[in-house]
Image (cartoon, grey):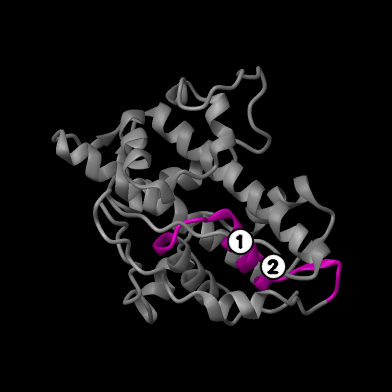
Amino acid sequence: MTAQPARLERTGPETASVIQASPFKPSLVRAVFRDVTSMHVSRSAAWAAASVTRTVLTEIIDGARRAAAEEARKKLVPGDLLTAIGRNVELDVGDQWYAHSPTFNGKRSRSRKQSAVVGAHRFEAGVRKLLRSQGATAVPAMVRDLDGIASVFLTGLARDAAMVVREGGLKRFGTVTLAMPGEPAAPPPPLEEPLRALSVRRGDGRTIGRDDILAATMIQLFGGSLRQRALIEAREAAQGTSAG
């Protein structure tokens, strides 16, 4: 089964209003970034990072909703999360959370730690708001997993954005083309131009900017359609914001 194509038609005022309603606010983004780096995070970068996190969580919830619908259920359970990830490798993000969640026992062989992931549970209110906006409900264990995945994903985004600043641009990236055995692989999305634009960084070495978040997104999201959608929506979210 090939990955779903990026929904490029979601542009304009409708998309902007959806993005502005993101449950992951810039203040929360900055709090996560402070756990990782002492660099300043620009306003446009905070909005972009919030948007990317929202896009990723929305896609995961969509996949889980489809899995639940197949069993005539409305409330999402952790098994729906496993099914969604199993069907779409692009959704396999924030995997450091797996060591902390009973949902993923056996999926990743790691010893569980007593302490939770740094920053987890800050996202619970936002996750519940996002679920409501998607017309979904979830059992507490599912909310916990979405909360943890969001925390780990955004922490990774912060680390990669700081690395991009230190290295002066995007130096490494990857892509995955999804296809069933025996089926021709779909051509990768046209990302060459964004890659060239992000390969050389502009700006000072003390501030994480919007383009640093876009570059970090290229590293964190290794698929095609989800990464393209996240980049498009992050650019839109950051439009009209100041650099401060």
Q: Residue at x 59, y 42 (%)?
A: 151
Q: Nearer the viewer, residue 224 or 25?
A: 224
Quarter residue 109 falls in:
top right
Residue 43 on the magenta segment:
no
Which image quadrant is residue 26 in?
Answer: bottom right
Q: Is residue 37 above or below residue 103?
A: below
Q: In this picture, is 24 found above or below 8?
A: above
Image position, residue 95 (x, y; %): 54, 37
Most extreme residue toward the front is: 182
Please report the residue visible at 42 percent of the width from the left and 43 percent of the height from the top: 128
Q: Which of the numbered marks, if any, corresponds to residue 173?
A: 1
- 111 or 34, nearer to the observer: 111
Q: Which residues are magenta?
A: 204-226
- Contact? badges 2 and 1 (CB < 8 Å): yes
Check the picture and name the quadrant holding the C terminus. bottom right
Is residue 129 visible from the viewing direction of this image?
no
